[in-house]
Image (tube, helix red, strand yellow):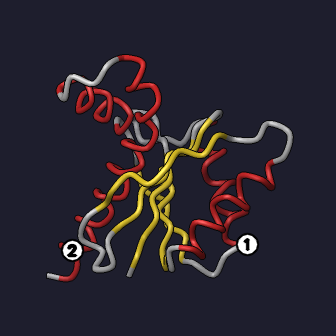
Amino acid sequence: MKALGLDLGTKTIGVALSDAFGWTAQGLTTIRRDETSEDADYTAVVTLIEENDVTTVVVGLPRNMNGSVGESGERSEQFAEALRSRSDAKIVMWDERLTTVAAQRVLVDADVSRKKRKQVVDKMAATLILQGYLDRQGHARS
């Protein structure tokens, strides 16, 4: 079971991919969102799903600290719904509260330069989203 993790931003989509066993997540790429065509975003994600034989896509769901879903969360839900109509992969929403903050902290602790952090933070956030999902699935199998 390969899974793809997505961290949806307004300008980029961070992407992570699991190993074939569904144990570990690794950053894969960052998709620069096409402001002129939403279809290009879906096409890029579907291409990654097909190229990597992905069976599950984990979409980060940004929630407010009180658990409610705000405007960015609604955009993520809309993206996931549209992706469902374009792919046979199982689409799962995953609470992503504080993943970008955690990704920034990991990169700062690793002494990654500010310029480089901007380039990889979305991919790192996607990795944290996907790893959280994989870890929970592992507990469910035990």
Judge depth for marks 1 and 2 and give the one in front. Answer: 1
**Mark 1 surroundings within 10 Å by alpha-carbon count, few (fewer than 14), some (14 through 19), many (20 or more):** few
Q: Position of residue 136 (x, y in %)?
A: 25, 66
Look at mark 2 in the image and give the residue it sits on.
Answer: 138
Q: Check the image and report above or below for 20 versus 73.
A: below
Horizontal side of 138 relative to 15 (left or right) equals left
Residue 33: quarter of image: top right
**Mark 2 surroundings within 10 Å by alpha-carbon count, few (fewer than 14), some (14 through 19), many (20 or more):** few
What amino acid is found at the position of numbered circle 2 in the picture? Answer: Gly
Residue 50: quarter of image: bottom right
Number of numbered callouts drawn: 2
What amino acid is found at the position of numbered circle 1 in the picture? Answer: Arg
Horizontal side of 89 relative to 44 (left or right) equals left
Residue under the point 61% across and 49% down? 76
Residue under the point 20% across and 82% down? 141
Kindly give the residue lying farthest to the top in the view shown. Answer: 114
Horizontal side of 136 relative to 48 (left or right) equals left
Query: Disc 1 versus disc 2: distance between alpha carbons?
Result: 28 Å
Look at mark 1 in the image and give the residue it sits on.
Answer: 86
Q: Position of residue 104 (x, y in %)?
A: 32, 28
Q: Check the image and report above or below for 10 versus 126.
A: above
Are the residues flagged by discs 1 and 2 in contact, CB closer than 8 Å?
A: no
